[in-house]
Image (spheres, rainbow, N blue to C red):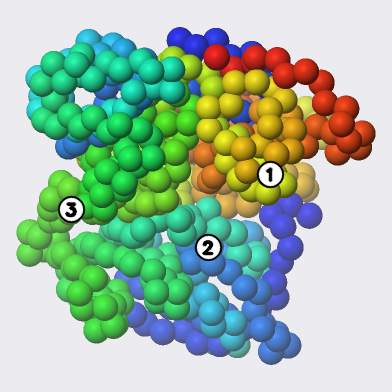
Amino acid sequence: MSKTAFPPAIKSRPVYGVLEPRPGAVHLVVADGEGAGAVTDMLAKAADRAGMLAAMHIIYTPGPNGTDQTAMLAALGAKQCYRAPTIPTLLPRLTRVLSDAHMGTQFYLAGTEGLIGQAERDIMATGFPHHDIQKEHRGSTVRRVQCVHCKGITENVATDPFVCSHCGLSLFVRDHYSRRIAAFQGVNIDAEDPGQVPPPVVRFT
Amino acid sequence: MSGGAKLKVRVAEVVNVNDMIKRFRFVSLDGSPMPAFSGGAHTVVEMDDDGVRRLNPYSLMSDPEDRSAYEISVRRDDAGRGGSLFMHRHVTPGLQMEISYPVNLFPLDTRARKHLMIAGGIGITPFLAQIAQLTHFGGRFELHYAARSQALGAYMDRLTAAHPAQVHCYFDDQGQVIDLARVLSMQPIGTHLYVCGPKGMIAWVLSTATSLGWPEKALHHEEFLAPGTGMPFQVDLAATGKTITVGTNQSLLEAMEAAGVDAPYLCRGGACGQCETNVIACDGAILHRDHWLTADEHAAGRKIMPCVSRFEGKSLTIDR
Ligand code: FES
């Protein structure tokens, strides 16, 4: 069970575990924000911590709440530790690393759902089974939501309902999740009674 | 009826592939196309061996795009229970037989970027169909195929001729062994591994891959178990109220069928899970031989796979 306690939800909603050291020729870590703590906790469990770090490539970006633990990760002494300013600038680096990665690479994703989901989507696109990508949630619970009407994606959604940043519809945030799109689904809340929009409540922090 | 729908076929051709292996070609009785299948599928062939009904699974090896016939290859097992011997001795062109619709327990995961195949001996057969399928779709693959000797390396010639860069052959009698750790370390991310062959080889490949960090869901294997022989034993069937005796050369599933009990099955080789049966009472030891139930389920002893597993002890009651 992950450190973050999520309310019970439908089966579609992703669940997260706790990162464990596994055998591998390369340990590829993709993390944001508080996810850095999951990486250090995992390393503390490693039988051969030095060996693991010597084969570790960390790709990190600050979290949506501003948490930046780059210094802590850089101090670990991994073979490579790269800080991207944002998730959109982190992803091309991941794609580049994946393009010449080999089987025997172990994946560790940690941090917010937006980061974990998009990294998982890109790793999965190579044919690597999503089931075997380790994921641990830490930090902010803001959501990446796709509007099912205009298909536009709004990042860091905190309230429910919220206003689609593309088409302006008021959207109800579902637990229905798309692994392929790496987003929750948002559905127009006042389709039947236009204008009847309940006041937004902060559900994701 | 258990085992799914059946196909009535005629043996169109029997070919000696080498000293140990014969190939059989089945066509439909009315000349209509055979049902489609995908690479890795098998069929269960029904044999009437002098009054003994035998049902053995064999991988389909022909091109899945070729609907004119199915082909299987059967390795003669002189120490086996007799199914392969029956095929070798008594199945000749013109014979009418019943076979099951194809079932695929060993499909390609087509999300994979590349397919790495490892075959031992007769374990080559599902890969022949899969390679044909991949060739149609332009899928990337690499095959490592070990046989006892050059003479027993069935279909090596045709494979190496068609795919010289992808096929690598090894011969036990020349002391050649797959450099597995090296092969596994060179595969691009997103490769899936498939292994079919003797039990020891499958265990070696899966454990080596796991120790090198290969993910569980990218490892695929197929092994049909022969039911195996053992001491005769008695079983009470709670649902039908019958008591049966399972003979030395019979499986529990076969003994139920011989007693007129319509028990479910699909693969008859401990792989598919279809025959899973609840154990109601057990005073003795269940000899689990399947690879369907988990180790915990084997230890708990509340379930049995009658197609391959046996019993030793005082009494066994199952829910059939
Ligand atoms: S029939 Fe498939 S496991 Fe028994």
Q: Secondary structure at mark 1?
A: loop
**Position in image of residue B158 (x %, y %):** 29, 82
- Asked whether B63 or B217 is in front, the reply is B217
The vertical placement of A168 against A199, above or below, is below
Pointer 1 residue: A167
Residue A19 visible to the viewer? no
Q: Residue furthest left?
A: B175
Q: Of the residues under marks 2 and 3, which one precedes in the sequence?
A: 2
Q: Label 2, label 3: how many angstroms apart (C-alpha)?
A: 28 Å
Pointer 3 residue: B186
The vertical placement of B248 against A10, above or below, is below
Q: Residue at x 53, y 46 (%)?
A: A180
Pointer 2 residue: B41
**Position in image of residue A18 (x %, y %):** 40, 17
Q: Is residue A31 found left or right of B294 in the rendered image?
A: left
On the rendered image, what quadrant is the C terminus of chain A found in? top right
- Asked whether A38 or B121 is in front, the reply is A38
Q: Within 8 Å of ligand 1, the CB of disc 2?
A: no
